[in-house]
Amino acid sequence: MYARIAGTGSHLPERVMTNKDLESLVDTSDQWIRERTGIAERRIAAEGETTCDLAEQAARKALDAAGLTGADIDLLIVGTTTPDLVFPSTACLLQHRLGAAECAAFDVNAACSGFIYAMSVADQFIRAGSASKVLVVGAETLTRMLDWNDRGTCVLFGDGAGAAVLVADSEPGILSTHIHANGGYGDLLCTEVGVSTGFKAEERGGVRVSMRGNEVFKVAVNTLGRIVDETLAANQLEKSDLDWLIPHQANLRIIKATAKKLNMSMDQVIVTVDKHGNTSAASVPLALDEAIRSGRVKRGEKLLLEAFGGGFTWGAALVVY
């Protein structure tokens, strides 16, 4: 039994912040940002617009695409690092809005790898026969965690949500998922505010993303190269067997490095980082939905989804769409 993608959806806040807009906030330039990241603009959640608000819109589109309603779902997983509340989970809040009464619902926090982690969990539930229709969402309002005086981080991130409905099917869908973590790198990309640590947000200038960008870049490129090899080997496939790479949209240089590792033309790579920035757990499902709705990705094609995030966490999913 496979977990097959039955429908996808995505949602972005209305407000667009361009690189030119950032020039008035911090010492940076459109050219500097484009050359180093590939980003031209990103979306910013409106005041009062929550992670669950974005997740709901993406989820409803995915359910519509799958021909299902919230009542049909028997498991709901949300990948996010920016939940509305510590508890209830964003998944529980979303469950109530969608009318998916009493199905299991929980959040997964694996930073930018959150959607891949959630997809992996959903795949295991379906393979075990414990669920047959699973809604997986990646949603973030990460701009609420930015220091707008730190040009090393504030230019990178954006808000958004993406979702996929996975259904049990005898036809091939998710062929395999591979997830890993190494907490030894935790201080390279993190926040310094928590509940049990006793650090209050106001004492640290708010909840802020802290990143040592050059070191993160080096580890990310090497790690994603390894997960590509692991995924192909597990499925006895060659690089040439892949039709599409749908990567985490963090940095265009990392995306190009992964494509080079696969000997793939950039014409076979879905790139949205220029329009979305790094939307963390929302990144992969946003790119996946755009690829499907644009008609580029077609049924029967093999997709490699991969992501790398704070933790460090990383993962990949090989999918027959």
Image (cartoon, helix red, strand yellow):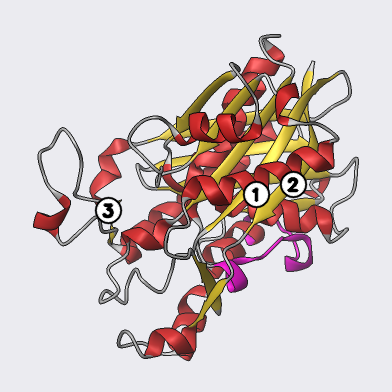
Question: How dense is the environment of label 2, judged by Cα within 10 Å: few (below 14), some, or many (20 and up)?
Answer: many
Q: Earlier in the sequence, mark 1 or mark 3?
A: 1
- Horizontal and vertical percent for residue 290? 74, 58
Residue on which the image places disc 1: 57
To which quarter of the image does residue 94 belong? top right
Residue occupying image coordinates x 31% and y 77%: 151
Q: How far apart in space, not on screen, are marks 3 and 2 (Cα)?
A: 36 Å
Which quadrant would the C terminus be assigned to in this image?
top right
Of residues 42 and 85, the one drawn nearer to the viewer in this rendering: 85
Q: Say which amino acid is labelled 3.
A: Leu
Q: How far apart in space, not on screen, are marks 1 and 2 (Cα)?
A: 6 Å
Secondary structure at badge 3 equals: helix
Q: Image height check: is 306 above or below 105?
A: below
Q: Earlier in the sequence, mark 3 or mark 2?
A: 2
Tag count in the figure? 3
Secondary structure at badge 1 equals: helix
* Residue 23 in the figure: left or right of residue 297: left
Q: Which residues are magenta?
A: 260-276
Residue occupying image coordinates x 64% and y 56%: 11
To which quarter of the image does residue 270 belong? bottom right
Mark 1 or mark 3, whichever is nearer to me = 1
Question: How dense is the environment of label 1, judged by Cα within 10 Å: few (below 14), some, or many (20 and up)?
Answer: some
- Horizontal and vertical percent for residue 28? 36, 87
Q: Say which amino acid is labelled 2.
A: Lys
